[in-house]
Amino acid sequence: MASVPTDSSIQLQPQPQHPEDTTSGLYVGKSVDRKDTLTAHQMSARHISCLSKFEGQQKKNTTDGALSKAFSKVEEKEVERYKKLFNTAFAVVKHGRPYTDYPFLCQIQKKNGLELGNDHIGRDACVDFQNAISAVLMKETENHMQSVRFVSIMSDSSTDSSVIDQEGILLRYVHPVSHEPVTAVASIEKLENARAEGVVQAIKTGVQKCGFDLENTQNNSPKLICVNLDGAAVNMGAKNGVAKQLSDLVDNKVIITHCVAHKLELGVLDGIKHMDYVKKFEDTIKRICKFYSYSPKRRQELQKLACFFQENLIMYTEIKAIRWVSSKLRALKAVCADLHVTVSHMEQVLSTSNKADELGQARAILNELKQVKFVKYIHLMTDVLSVITKTSELFQTKDLLLFEVKEAIDTLYMKLLAMSKEPGENLSKFYSVFDKESALFDGKLKLTGHLPVFGEDKDVHDLLEKVATYILNRFSDLGRPPVSNFQVFDFRTWPFSLQDLSTYGCKEIGTLCDEYSDILTDEERSSIPSEWQTLKVQVSMQRKSHPLAVYTSILQRQEESVKHILVLLNMLVTVSPSTAACERLFSNMNFVKNSFRTRLTQQNLQNQMRIIVSDTQLEDFDPLQAVEFWLQSGHRHITHRKRQRAATVVPTQASTASCSDVTDQESIQPFVDAIVNTLGGEDIARQKLKDMASDSAKQCLIM
């Protein structure tokens, strides 16, 4: 309050204090002509009450400021401790370890002298930290969805260890800052049913978690331009399949792609199913692998024979149906390399075993192994599957572009046709080491049967031509628009002369503008044809670089001269030809949710998969954002460790009870002393600690 004035007339102004009566004239302001009016008010009970409240508030503000400063020092040390705990939790989750490994790792670190405190070192803390890290990653994807223009959906299903159908949903888009293609996990959803409507609902739920609502697309929402699925009828059905239902949800054209890696395997199977002997050959290979892969005794006997013959042994493994080409190639290489040892072991089994079942298997396998046609097919199929496997591995790369598929298929087709004219590497070796007169293979193994001349071997030519033709037919959709029109961006096929280059691709670019007229603006449609000429000049100077690197750099520069055609480049990079990322997601799922963790909850599975599949590695992980999210989430007051029964303490004058099950008093005593010294009194410090404990990150309460 102001001091008593000496002037005879004073104009009072409204006061910022906390009066009891806000309608008083001394509060709202009035003219005072007499000094004794103010003197009387100064001595009144109401004025004294207001003055006492004002002084108390001033003292409280000073105390709170000092306490906040003291707590900031405490919280800074706590945040550093939390960062260490989050790093530990991230390592556990990233490597697919069970949450119970987290307390164990914390104990090791504490034993090695790292200050981790006594709270938030249990299994539940690891789950909370995982959820916070996953939420930050999901928020990042959600922020991207507000900035990107186009998005592709990749989806596939698999059964986990608890026999639950899981639908993996991933998004591919161009990063709004780096302009590189990004494949992010939207979610992994439990399927309520495996029909099309169940899969569609799971996909809609999954992408909505990342801020992409398929049923409520706004003007600033990204446009769905591609749906990439496997070839199951439930997915690719023309009338009511998953892809059809998803494309019907949006009002623009959507490219529906059948995973190229899966399509390649189907093409191979189409080609060989018409060859009767290939089916018999495949059954024999599977029988050999099964004969050894499940019997340690037989594998040990085979190893001893290999040592006796001084040969390197490639052990047989089971052929995996989901990766037929690659696993079949490994099996063929094992049979080819271990042929002599395997024949010797089969002969040993026939002479020593007394088990009828084992004798029957060994006799059937040995009869096939000694056929010249069988040995020839081992080498032939090794050549065929080698070139197919290289193409399959290309299709499983992370950032495959649409026009790279056409190039790979054409190359594979030519290699297979070339093998029908001249034998491949392994088949040539077979012809060189097989002596027709003695029927000895490699001078050791006596074979039976007739070997025709390569040029007259109709079986070999038919097999190669059918496999090549069926693979080409499987990818015939690459020649249909709009997919075929995107081939124009493959600058490796561009003409070199400026005269030819000036007219190259103009028709295809115009067709793309017409196909996507509902996405492009009028300005973009009118400017793209002229900017196409500028883009061709810029790109033709970088022909030696990889297409993805070239187009990513152009997107990053955002030059004014090609700013409208960049929309088509954005679409090209966004379109996903392969669901290999979904297969990698399921491989990690099977590793995490194994037979020992069948009760892993769906939310924990989703969060752990999001962290595992992310590009962030332990050495690059910055836990600060996740720590901040967790501190604001309301979970920070939970004590994540087993409570111990407190010992009975007899109160004395020199001692007080402490909550030993919450924290270690000795470890926080320096912080308490600092607060007490700052506030200038132990009673004030204790009272303020009690008042602010619920809002502080410090997990302690000193009573």
Image: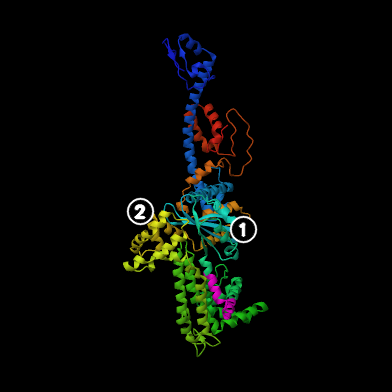
Along the line of sight, which residue is nearer the eye, 657 or 456?
A: 456
Residue at figure coordinates x 45%, y 82% from the top left: 421
* Front in this rendered view, residue 528 or 686: 528
Quadrant position of the C terminus in the picture:
top right
Marks 1 and 2: CB-CB under 8 Å? no
Q: Secondary structure at mark 1?
A: helix
**Vertical order, 645 against 409 (above or below):** above
What residue does disc 2 label? 560
- State whether residue 71 is above or below residue 607: above
**What residue type is disc 2 on?**
Glu
Q: Locate residue 264, reporting x and y percent.
A: 52, 70
Residue displayed at 55% across by 64% down: 230
Q: Residue at x 48, y 67 (%)?
A: 480
Looking at the rendered structure, the kind of residue marked 1 is Glu
Residue 683 position, x and y percent, is: 54, 27
Q: Residues within 10 Å of mark 2 (few under 14, many from 20)?
A: few
Residue wearing tag 1: 197
Q: Position of residue 461 (x, y in %)?
A: 50, 82
Q: Which mark is residue 141?
A: none
Q: Nearer the viewer, residue 155 or 283?
A: 155
Question: In the image, is residue 276 part of the stretch drawn in magenta?
Answer: yes
Kindly report the secondary structure that dominates the magenta region of the rendered protein.
helix
**Residue extent of the magenta highlight:** 264-284
